[in-house]
């Protein structure tokens, strides 16, 4: 069985937005930057489990909608002075299709 699943196309995600993929391992947010880069994070802020997919995407970060914590999209690390990390997941693009690995980085 492959660890990669197709989750849609780049066009399915609004610029500076996100979509949620429901998996057996929990929800994963798939994010699109202004440069059409695609990232995937556990859809849960490490602070108080806010849904990151409902946050604001800016640059290569997302701001949690609950308490404004900033999370790096390219690895899940919280931006200082806050501390913590959420799981990140590999993505690959083939044409305009997005594929997500269900095996977290690290």
Image (cartoon, rainbow, N blue to C red):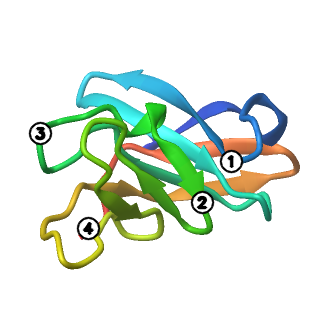
* Image coordinates for residue 29, horizontal then vertical, percent: 45, 38
- Are discs 4 and 1 less than 8 Å apart at CB? no
Mark 1–mark 2 Cα distance, whole angstroms, equals 7 Å
Mark toward the start of the polypeptide (3 vs 4): 3
> Which residue in the structure is indicated by mark 3?
48
- Disc 2 + disc 4, Cβ < 8 Å: no
Instruction: Report helix, strand or loop for mark 2.
Output: strand
Q: Which numbered dot is residue 58?
A: 2
Q: Earlier in the sequence, mark 3 or mark 1?
A: 1
Q: Residues within 10 Å of mark 3 (few under 14, many from 20)?
A: few
Pointer 1 or 2: first along the chain: 1
- Residue under circle 4? 78
Picture layout, residue 67 above or below residue 72: above
**Does residue 20 appear to the left or right of 70 in the view shown?**
right
Q: Are marks 3 and 1 in contact (CB under 8 Å)?
A: no
CB-based contact (under 8 Å), mark 1 and mark 2: yes
Q: Quadrant of the N terminus?
A: top left
Which sits in the foreground, 99 or 10?
Answer: 10
Q: Which numbered circle lies on residue 100?
A: none
> What is the distance, in whole Å, between disc 3 and disc 4 at their CAs?
13 Å
Circle 4 — which element? loop
Inter-mark Cα distance, 2 to 3: 21 Å
Q: Are marks 3 and 4 in contact (CB under 8 Å)?
A: no
User: CA separation, marks 4 and 1?
Assistant: 19 Å
Residue 64: x, y in percent? 35, 45
On screen, residue 32 above or below 83: above
Extreme residue in the bottom direction: 80
Q: Sort mark 2 into few (<14), some (14-19) or many (20+) by Cα contacts within 10 Å.
A: some
The numbered mark, 2 or 3, whose residue comes first in the sequence reads 3
């Amino acid at each position: 069985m492959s660890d990669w699943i197709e989750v849609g196309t780049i066009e399915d995600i609004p610029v500076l937005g996100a979509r949620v993929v429901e998996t057996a391992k929990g929800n994963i947010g798939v994010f699109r930057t202004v440069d059409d880069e695609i990232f995937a994070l556990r859809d849960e802020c490490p602070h108080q489990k806010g849904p990151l997919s409902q946050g604001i995407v800016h640059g290569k970060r997302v701001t949690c909608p609950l308490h404004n914590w900033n999370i790096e999209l390219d690895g899940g690390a919280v931006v200082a002075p806050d501390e913590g990390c959420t799981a990140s997941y590999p993505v690959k693009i083939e044409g305009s299709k997005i594929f997500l690995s269900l095996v977290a980085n690290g």
